[in-house]
Image: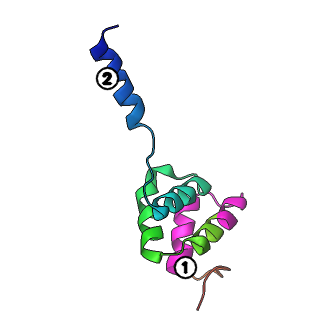
Amino acid sequence: MTNASNYLKELKKRAGASRVYKKYQLDGLEIADLLNDRTHKALYIRLAKERGDASELRHIAGTIAENSRIKNKGAYFMTVITGKSNGSNNPHHKS
C-alpha cells in the first residue's frame, strides 16, 4: 500500500473514535451507553451540559437501563426527566 492509502485508512479509523474534552461530554456519553442509545449522544451531552451535575441523570438512566420491560429506553428517559406523563404513574417524576 502507498503512504496515501495508509494515511486515509488511519483517518477513517480516527474518525470513529470518540473524543472527550469536557466532563459533561463524558457524562452524556455514559448516559447514552446506559440507555443503549448512541445515536442520540449529542442530546445526552447537551442535557448533561445544561443540567450541570449529571449524577441524577446517570442515576435515572441506570434505573431505566435495569428495567427489561422498557422497550425504548431513550424515549422513556426523556419522558421521565421532562416530567411529562401520559396519565401513568411515573416513579421518577418530581412534583
Q: Is residue 87 above or below residue 14?
A: below
Residue appearing at x 72%, y 60% in the figure: 66
Please report the bounds of the magenta region as a residue range: 62-84
Q: Is residue 71 magenta?
A: yes
Residue appearing at x 42%, y 55% in the figure: 21
Q: Quadrant of the N terminus?
A: top left
Disc 2 designates what residue? 8
Residue 64 image position (x, y, % from top left): 66, 65
Between 6 and 60, the residue placed more toward the observer is 6
Secondary-structure class at tag 1:
loop
The CA distance from mark 2 to mark 1 is 50 Å
Q: Is residue 16 above or below residue 41?
A: above
Disc 1 designates what residue? 86
Q: Marks 2 and 1: which is nearer the front?
A: 2
Secondary-structure class at tag 2:
helix
Is there CB contact under 8 Å for labels 2 and 1?
no
Q: Is residue 43 magenta?
A: no
Q: Is residue 66 left or right of residue 94?
A: right
Q: Which residue type does callout 2 highlight?
A: Leu
Between 5 and 81, the residue placed more toward the observer is 5
Q: Earlier in the sequence, mark 2 or mark 1?
A: 2
Q: Is residue 33 left or right of residue 2?
A: right
